Image (cartoon, rainbow, N blue to C red):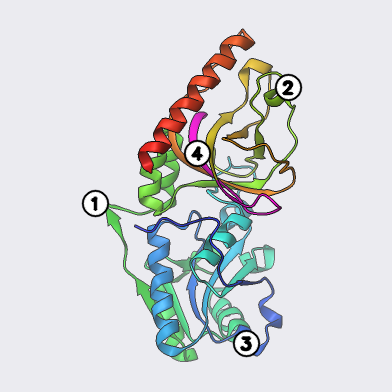
Amino acid sequence: MTWFDAGKRVTKMRILSDYRSLDAREKGAAVAIGNFDGIHLGHQSIIELARHHSSARQIPLAVMTFEPHPREFFSPSSPPFRLMNRAARAHRLEQLGVEILYELSFDKSLSRMSSERFVEEILCQGLGLKVAIAGNNFHFGKGRTGSITTLSEQGERQGFEVFVAPMLEINGQAYSSTAVRKSLSEGRPRDAATLLGHWHRIEGKVVHGDKRGRAMLGYPTANLHLKGLHPPRMGIYTVKIDILSGSHQGQYQGVASLGVKPSFGQNPLNLETFIFDFDGDIYGETLSVALIEFQRPEIQFSDIHLLKKQMDIDSQKAKDILAQLD
């Protein structure tokens, strides 16, 4: 299992959204194709196979995915299901050494494109790919009529190679984003990490909150919204934090509350992170918070002093858990 360092410096990845205007150096890659939500170990196996073929042929390593996720396009009112936003996905792919991310706009035109036209117009004329790699459950084109078999057949006619990444399983079950969501919904971040090959992270820009943590409780917190993301079980978590931008870039430890702050009325879902031994201003900076262990469910307190006492207990428990990891 590979545990990724969110703060690791890697070669800058190019992110391209318009397949119609690529120059020569942005074409001719070995391309892993899929949605890659969460980038679990199954996804990583597809990327590793693409890496093998890119290295053998000395061509770029690329990933092709879609934004928004097709499920969001077809069912915009469905509950949030994504494990990562587009910035977090790009960040993780860059860490994996992907050189080019083709992040195609999934719109009405693309949704109506036949599988034959998808291959001809996007893969061949647009990307000019040399090798396509996907899982055996990959489908594409209007009505999902294209399969990995039809992609292979079209590849033979169009002059590019197609390879199928083998399905990875754990305890008889395939690695899947659905299984990761289930683990997180049940408050089992370590089980989610086993499927992902890395800690599940919530990434975003630090926003201003109500300042109660600093003013009333002595626990200043960095606040992240979870808009559009699948919500893990609400409660208190042991966390590791990477500050990815600004003058305080680095790795830290802490404790976080994921929930709606029931002790203070009705509030939107939010992740509030208290960073141990830290007092810097990081409003507007990008934070990556790794969920390490679920400590307890969210509780409503009628007394601010009881809440403060519980926060002291939560912080110490988080420190004990993190000490055991080291």
Of residues 213 and 104, the one nearer the viewer is 213
Q: Is residue 52 above or below residue 87?
A: below
Disc 4 to disc 2, C-alpha distance:
23 Å
- Give the residue at mark 4: 239
State the extent of the magenta-drawn residues as a range.
233-251
Circles 1, 3 touching at the beta carbon (< 8 Å): no
- The local crowd at label 4, few if under 14, some if 14 to 19, many if 20 or more residues have their Cα within 10 Å, is many
- Which numbered disc, 1 or 3, marks the residue that appears first in the sequence? 3
**Disc 4 versus disc 2: nearer the observer:** 2
What amino acid type should be assigned to the residue bearing mark 2?
A: Ala
What amino acid type should be assigned to the residue bearing mark 4?
A: Val
- Give the residue at mark 2: 215
Disc 3 to disc 4, C-alpha distance:
40 Å
Circles 4, 2 touching at the beta carbon (< 8 Å): no
Residue at 70% over, 52% down: 247
Q: Is residue 242 left or right of residue 137?
A: right
- Give the residue at mark 3: 25
Q: Position of residue 324 (x, y in %)?
A: 36, 37
Q: Is residue 225 left or right of residue 143?
A: right
What amino acid type should be assigned to the residue bearing mark 1?
A: Gly
- Which numbered disc, 3 or 2, marks the residue that appears first in the sequence? 3
Which quadrant: the C terminus? top left
